[in-house]
Image (tube, grey):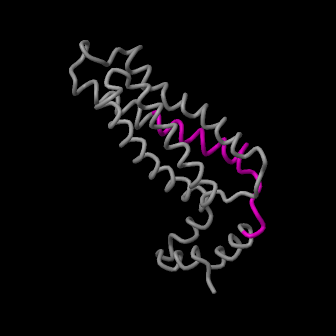
Amino acid sequence: MPSPTQRALTRVPPRYRPFLVKHRTLVKFMMVGGTCFALTAVVNFGLKLTVLRDKPVLALTVATVLATAVSYVLNRQWSFRAAGRQREAALYFAVSAVAVVVNDLPLAVSRYVLELREPAVGHLTQELADFLSGMIVGTLLAMGFRFWAMNRFVFTRFSARVRAENRASERV
């Protein structure tokens, strides 16, 4: 009986299958990232429009930390499915703590170095600068760092079942 991955691959046009098989971890990681990006955006804007109106960097930090917890579960169970390690969660959250700083830096630079905030600029300019620097640039930088660091330090050993599934899906 084919695995869920093999069944999903049969729905993909044949010319894209080799790419998806070869880069399956990256594709899964990016799908988790997209989900967590949406979560981060909703929480960030919810906080910025309510209780953290004057603290945009803190709002982004809280949203990113929440999404990081969700990301851990999704990446651990689906993207990487690594063999268990005792220090895996600690390593994941250590890497993620660095990634939160990487994510916040562009917003902090935009707000406090470039002074793209009210009253120096209009409200719309401030919000656009916050979105572009924090949600787009920061997220892209942090995503690149996380993918590299997760492969390098956290999810380093794949289970035998995943290796066997990968070999089987390469034949599809």
Which one is in front, 22 or 25? 25
Which one is in front, 136 or 155? 155
* Residue segment shown in magenta: 138-161
Q: Predominant secondary structure in magenta? A: helix
The answer to whether 148 is drawn above or below residue 167 in the figure is: above
Which one is in front, 66 or 158? 66
Q: Position of residue 107 (x, y in %)?
A: 42, 25
The answer to whether 139 is drawn above or below residue 124 in the figure is: below
The answer to whether 40 is drawn above or below residue 138 in the figure is: below
- Which quadrant of the structure image shows residue 135? top left
Q: Position of residue 94 (x, y in %)?
A: 66, 35
Q: Position of residue 96 (x, y in %)?
A: 60, 37
Q: Residue at x 44, y 37 (%)?
A: 63
Residue 159, magenta (yes or no): yes
- Which quadrant of the structure image shows residue 153? top right
Q: Position of residue 84 (x, y in %)?
A: 76, 55
